[in-house]
Image (tube, rainbow, N blue to C red):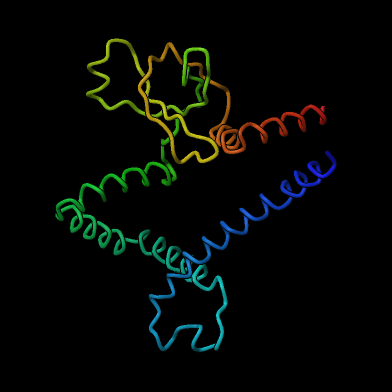
Amino acid sequence: MPMKKYLLTGLLVWVPLGITLWVLNFTISTLDQSLLLVPDALQPDKLLGFHIPGLGVILTIGIVLTTGILARNVFGQRLLRWGDGLLARIPFVSSIYKGVKQVSDTLLAENGNSFRKVLLVRYPHPQAWSLAFQTNVPGEIGRVLDDEHVGVFIPTTPSPVNGFYFFVPKAATVELDMSVDAALRAIVSMGVVAAAEDAAQIKSL
């Protein structure tokens, strides 16, 4: 029995550490691919004689930041409109680009309205409740449905980027006085973070 406890304790130490290091290594390795944009003669590995992980991260941040600065001025906005128009005229590519752009604009824009409210909905069966985010109902769908419905996105745990998109009667939902950030933390941590925050609040009283 003690051996099993020691093994589980060791796993509790190494599993989150190992996964964190793996994610960091994958992220840095992926972003380092941006160094391929640098001419071969100016590659840091050749100039320095050794590889420094993370230089691609700095380059990627610089590219994104520069793009954001350019996109904020008149010339940059005209260039973006020209690029959008060019991609919109390419068959198949236009449908993918438009869909991805609409999603990214909704999620990342400063005035985005991606998730309006946090709700409780009956899922995956009538005796269970799941956290959900209220989104929008397309006009045509809202027109053909009898009662007032709301669009809900039910994320999966622990990866909230995946999930299910449903239309449910508004009367069948429960609106929560909970922020989207708090709901996302609860989903990602499977409720552990929410319980810890509640315990901390109780201690502070």
Judged left or right of residue 71, residue 47 is right
Judged left or right of residue 94, residue 11 is right
Residue at image point 46% right, 41% down: 161
Residue at image point 44% right, 45% down: 110
Q: Quadrant of the N terminus?
A: top right
Residue 188 sits above or below residue 61 on the image: above
Residue at image point 38% right, 83% down: 39
Residue 144 sits above or below residue 32 on the image: above
Q: Farthest right residue?
A: 2
- State the image coordinates of residue 168 (x, y, percent, origin top left): 38, 18
Q: How many marks?
A: 0
| The quarter of the displayed image where residue 147 is located | top left
Residue at image point 19% right, 55% down: 85
- State the image coordinates of residue 35 (x, y, percent, origin top left): 44, 75
Q: Nearer the viewer, residue 56 or 16?
A: 16
Q: Quadrant of the C terminus?
A: top right
Q: Nearer the viewer, residue 25 or 202?
A: 25
Residue 80 sits above or below residue 201 on the image: below
- State the image coordinates of residue 23 (x, y, percent, origin top left): 56, 56
Judged left or right of residue 61, residue 16 is right
| The quarter of the displayed image where residue 8 is located | top right
Residue 94 sits above or below residue 150 on the image: below
